[in-house]
Structure formats: C-alpha cells, structure tokens
Amino acid sequence: MSAKVNISSLPRPEICLRSREEGVTLAAGPVRDEAGNLTNEFDSIVNDYDGLSEAVLTAKSSIYSENGEILGILSDSSVKLYSNSERKLKLEVNEPSVRVIALSPLGSFVLTWKKHEKGSENGNMIVWRIADGEKVFQVFERNYAEDTWPAVKWTSNEEIAGHMVKNAVHLYKGQAMEEGIIRKIQFDRVSSFSLASTPGPECNDFPFRIAVFRGEQKGKPAQASLFNHPGGETAVRTKSFFRAESASFLWAPQGNAVLVKTETSVDVTGASYYGESSVYLMRADVDYDCKIVMKKEGNFQDVAWSPKGKEFVAIAGSMPALAVLFNLKGDPVFQFGEVHRNTIRWSPQGRFLCLGGFGNLSGDMDFWDINKKKIMGSNKANCAVDFSWSPDGRHFMTATLSPRMKVDNGITMYTYYGDKVFEKSYSELYSAKWRPRTADVYPDRPQSPRLKSLNKEREGKPKAFVPYRPPGAPRSRAAERFRAEREGSGPKKIASTGPVISKAAARRQRKKLAEAAKAAEAEGKTAAEAQNQPVSKYSESEKKLRKLKKQLKAIVEIEKKLQSGVELNEQQKDKLSKKSEIETQIQELS
C-alpha cells in the first residue's frame, strides 16, 4: 500500500491566461473558501516575477516549456524568457517581427521564426541559448507550417535535436547545435519527422529513435520508416500504404512504439467530406506493425497514448463514434461505447480520462477511471475551444477563446466527477494554459469522496422530463431509432481475441475455410475437421520433391548463362556447387 499523501505539501497548480483587458495573467489557484469550496478568485503571482508586470499588456502570445521551468512571452519587439522557479527574467531577445516561438523540453533553448526578408543574408529561424543569449543555430526557413512546427525538435532530455531539410533529416547534439551536423538521415521526399522521447527501461537497445514519412505520389505508395541513432543507414522498420498524403506521429512515452495517423484531403469512396484517415501501429522494439481497424467505419476523430505507455484510446466512425481502448499489440481490450465524442484527454498520471465532444458537437464530456473501467460522471461545456487537465490530475479546464468564439469567453473547471466547481468570464480571452510539471511533482491519487455540497446539489436537480404516453399506445420505431442514435451504446469489455481484421482479410479467411470444407467433402470428412487442417493437395514428400526440382531448374539456367560467357556472382556459384547434392535427393524421393 502506498504512503498517504500530504496534500497540503503539494504546490498549487499555476495557470497562464491572456486576455484583452488584463494581458498576461499568472495565477495560482483557484482559491478555496473556509468551507473548502473553490471560489471565482485566483491568487495573482504576476508581481512575484521581476519585471513581468511591464510585459503582460504588450504580449502577443505566451508559452511554457515542457517541464514548466521557462515561461516565454512574445511581443512585437522582443521575446522575454522567465524562470518560473526563480521568478525572474532569464533572457530578453530583442528581435523585432518574430511571428512564433517554441521552447526546448527542458527550457534550455528558445526557437524563433520570422518572415524571411528579401536581400537578408542571415537566416530567419534562430535557436538561442537561454543561459547566455548566444545564437547556436540559424538557417533560412521560408515557410511556417503549424502542423510541422516546431521545425527543430528535441528529445525530452535535449541530448539530440533534429531539423528537416529537402530529402533528409539532420541530427545535432541537442545541447551543442553550434558544433554542426552529427548525422544525416537520407529519405527522399520527406515531409514530416518526429523524435521519440528519451527511452525507458523497456527499450535500451538504442538510445534514440526517429520516425520519417513521405506521402503518396504518382502511384507510388506512402512510406513511414523508423531509424535508430546511433545506428546504420537503413531503416529498422518500414511500412508502406496507399491513400496517405500526410501523416502525424504519436510516440508511446517509453519510445517503444509509435502511432502513425495518415490523412488524405479527398475520400475516394465519397463517404466523407473531410477526406480519409487511418491509424497504424509500428513497434520500434520488435518487428511488428498492424493497422488499427475499428468495428465502425469512418474517419479517426482522435487517438492518444496513455501517459503510462501501455495502452491507447482511439475514436473513429460517423457519429455517434466508437471509442475503444487498445493494448500495445493493437488488440481492442475495452469499448467505451458509441457516443457523440471526438476528443481524448488523459490526466497526466494516466488514471483518469475525459472523452469530449467539442468543435461541431454539443460539448458533452464523460469522465472515466481507467483502472476501474467505470464512468465517474458527465457534464457539458458549450462552445469550448481549448480543454486540458490540471497537472495534479484533479481538475479539468475548458476555455472559450477568441477569435474562434466572439461571445461567452471564459474558463470553467470541473472535477474528475464532472462537477462544475469554478467559472470566470472575460470579454475577450485568447489563451488559457496550465503550467506543466514533471511527473515527480504530483503523485497518482485515486478518487476522493464527493463533497457533500455537490452531492446535495446533484440530488436536488429535477429529473429529466418524460412525455406522457397512454397505456397501450404504439411506440414509433423511427423515434426509437433516432433515440438510440442520439444516446449511442454503452461500454463493454472486449474478450482478448486478437486484433480486429479488415474486410479483405475476413474475405480471404472465409475463402480458405470454404476450400477446406470442399476438400474435406471429397475425402469424406466433416467441415469442422477440415478447418483444423491445412488445405493442400500434396503430401510432405511431394512438396519437398517439387521444391528440389524448382531449385534444379534454376541451376540449369545458371549453367546456360555460364556457357554463354556471363560472369557469375557468388550466390550463383554457390547454387551451382549444390547441383549433385540436389540430384541425389531427387533420386531418393523419386
């Protein structure tokens, strides 16, 4: 049994908000009243930072590093980097016209990009070392693409950095990019790449893994490949597929597997206006890959790994979509049911899961305890644009942001039971982000009993209205069908029967069983007996004899080449030396 956690010793989660009236706001909270309930007030910590209050009103964007150590604030004239632990300014980059910034995972470097200026001899994309403000990397990057940003990627420990160029990916020492390229991974027409996080104990054979992708072109299939570093020039895993113009990679936290989500802009079947998408699982530690096949046809709405790295959830199909939990082999192990959901959000500890229906859906949310495979509660967040768990995994925040939504801007917080506990409105809110924390800051805690005030509030809610129906009145089948479609199906555990096979594989399997039944009928056997035996019209000795004759035929062809003056390679000479041995075996079997 784990030791009891002293909750009062844990740091309060921090949040960064950017709004029209207040600029950038940093706060800890929200604050609890004497009864223990959350209030609509934060404890502002802006004044705790040295010089931050002067930068908040001019900020265009703000960003946290992956470990939560550095806060970056971008304005029209500069980029300011603050240390969250020391509460002071670490670096100010006086680089005007910067459009977008990114931080390395440990907050050691900041990447800036601005529009390329004609006649400029200096690169428009720069990596700055935050400790001393030195430029360690500078190149021309003419185009900014949101789906491939940041253009420079680091592993989580910053030991390796990667940058994609035409037909190759260049690798650098993550902490010393100024030393130059340490490896070039050649890959024609590469359109995207991804670095796995630092490997865990399950994959120590090679320290780093790199995934690359090129799209389908002129009848040639798309291809995704995995490389090891350090390693050879050839890929250790390769997967080819059609109907794939672009792809995104989702690495398991241990780096031993990656999900490849492929997309096309046009669905050739005409089933979807939004194109077509597929998901493939590629293992990096063993020679295994498979296509993730859902029982319900349709595009994948979302897919996400558990922070524990041993399972992932996928949502696919037309609404109500099907949500399924898969293991590392791609086998479905639990079905959440058919619901109107398109978003997956895991709590940082991997215990709780929120399945939401945002965007063009009505905002319904279900909160699950994955350990128990049970739903804890539900609620609705209308017009939510952004949504995320707090770093301690105890609250879920939804935000209605501008310019996507011009009205009702603000943030709302819910418990993992789905109870609304906090709400704050803004005239225009542009972003809302939790400060990330490393995995050792907040422990994995189970559910706590609901507050009595929330239980009473739920008990006091009126029951849903049910229209009166006279006894014996006929029920409309159409109404029942629409109701079932709206409510979807419930969750259920899936027996371990292996991965779901595609329609083509199912047809081949049925054809094989039919051939077995036909052969069994000729021999007087039952179909059940035939299913357990391989379909073959040759005995084992006849199979071996046919194989040897095929090899002898190939040797005769080699002899003809030799007589015509063709120079033989080592493999052909080796086959030629085995002629007498093969002829002896054929005589024995004949």
Image: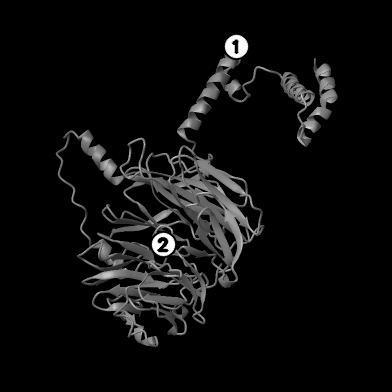
Left or right, residue 326 beside residue 408: right
Left or right, residue 89 beside residue 497: left
Q: Quadrant of the N terminus?
A: bottom right
Q: Label 1: which residue?
A: 522
Q: Is residue 345 above or below residue 271?
A: below
Can residue 156 be seen from the camera position used here? yes
Residue 161 on image: x %, y %: 55, 65
User: The disc labelled 1 sits on which kind of residue?
Assistant: Ala
Residue 445 on image: x %, y %: 47, 67
Residue 391 occupies which quadrant of the picture? bottom left
Q: Residue furthest front?
A: 119
Q: Is residue 50 above or below residue 61?
A: below
Residue 88 on image: x %, y %: 43, 85
State the mark number for residue 142.
2
- How many C-alpha atoms fall within 10 Å of the one at disc 2: few (<14), some, or many (≥20)? few
Q: Name which residue lies at 55% across and 24% down.
A: 512
Left or right, residue 144 beside residue 589: left
